[in-house]
Image: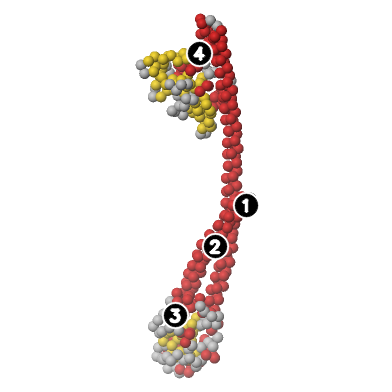
Amino acid sequence: MRKDRLYLYTFLAISILFVIIGGISAKYYVALSAEQMLNTQLVSSKREAKEVASLIGDQFSNGIAKQEIKQNTQRSIQNTNDDNSFISILDWSGKIISHPDRTLVDTMLPQEASSGFTMNKEISAENFYELILNATPDQTDVLVLNPVPNSDWIIAAYANTGKISNEIKTVRNRFYVIFGIMGFVMVLTSVFTVRLIGSLYEKKLEIKNETLETEIINLAKLNSDLSDYQNRVNQDITQVQESLETEEQAKETNIIEDAVTEKSKMRILTYLRNELRSIATEEIAYIYTEHTITYVVDFQGKKSTTNSSLDELYSGLNDSYFYRANRQFIIAISAIQKIIRYGNNQLKIVVDPSSEIDIIIGKNKAAEFKQWLNL
């Protein structure tokens, strides 16, 4: 249920973000495309008005009668007002001399068709776009006025702003539809991608959790084995101590050596500052080296030094009671407080009293250490 809700929220978030960004960008691109199209229309209308004015001016220069020119022009432009742009002829008073719609001939140019327009002023693409936005369905507007040489006529280039507005709206609606379909597909693809990535991550996480659970179980078993082993060692020591109480003082050393190990040392000679100190092996918590100096730490936390190396010391210790954790440490079974998973298949040993240096058993010796605990 939580996953479905998360995917729903993801879908809504991506959709809202897409609508906001897409709406702003779509409006901008539609306006930009419309202005480019209208700019092309303006250039075309200017060129057409100039060419027609030049052509009619040549006819006046050749002495052709005004009425004949009017009739020829009327036949040429008849019914062209259905196009996006068309031309008509005016005189300087604003009277229409020739127009695609014959009913408008000999009428005055409507004020709204050239509102704010002068002969020396050129309409820009931005102004043209504003006209398109506010245009009525049958609206036409004058874009260009070009005087005819050798006459009092003016060539007026019109734009069917209402028709152009409808075309732009149609293009805009199609663009929004295509943009919406693309957006819907992109949003769905994004959601499915997020879901796929999430599923893969969840599977990896589940595998990692299963591995972690297995390692936790193994560590729990390892600590349980440690506790059992420590109990066995303590029982052995107790039995040895009880035996010592019942035997003669002269046989104490032989009894301890036979009970623990034939080769193990009973005491180690160490130095505490200028004082010689003899420590019984059962009182040693751990031994380690640092900067070529070998330190012996007992269960009281007292630290002393010895001239022997770890190899020399370990060869004389009971290997069922002491373990060579690494090149730097020898630890007693009774000093191990707990075992923690460390790094990649490594083990960290926590001892009491605590060590200033981490006691790490490498992955190559981890199996051997587990086997030692199971002895």
Residue under numbered circle 3: 46
Identify residue type, mark 2.
Val
**Residue at the image position 40 percent from the left and 88 percent from the top:** 149
Tags 4 and 1 touching, CB below 8 Å = no
Labels 3 and 4: the sequence-earlier one? 3
Q: Which mark is residue 4?
A: 1
**Location of residue 211 (image quadrant):** top right
Q: Which mark is residue 147?
A: none
User: Which element carries disc 4, helix, strand or loop?
Assistant: loop
Identify residue type, mark 1.
Asp
For mark 1, does the 10 Å Cα neighbourhood hold few (<14), some (14 to 19), or many (20 or more) residues?
Answer: few
Residue under numbered circle 4: 264
The image shows residue 14, relative to residue 197, as above or below, that is: below
Q: Nearer the viewer, mark 3 or mark 4?
A: 4
Does residue 263 appear in the picture of this structure? yes
Residue under numbered circle 2: 19
Q: Nearer the viewer, mark 4 or mark 2?
A: 4
Work out which residue is located at the far front of the displayed protein and give it: 245
For mark 4, does the 10 Å Cα neighbourhood hold few (<14), some (14 to 19), or many (20 or more) residues?
Answer: some
Alpha carbons under labels 2 and 1: distance apart: 22 Å
Q: Nearer the viewer, mark 3 or mark 1?
A: 1
Alpha carbons under labels 3 and 4: distance apart: 113 Å
**Residue at the image position 55 percent from the left and 80 percent from the top:** 137
**Residue at the image position 36 percent from the left and 16 percent from the top:** 274
Its colouring scheme is secondary structure
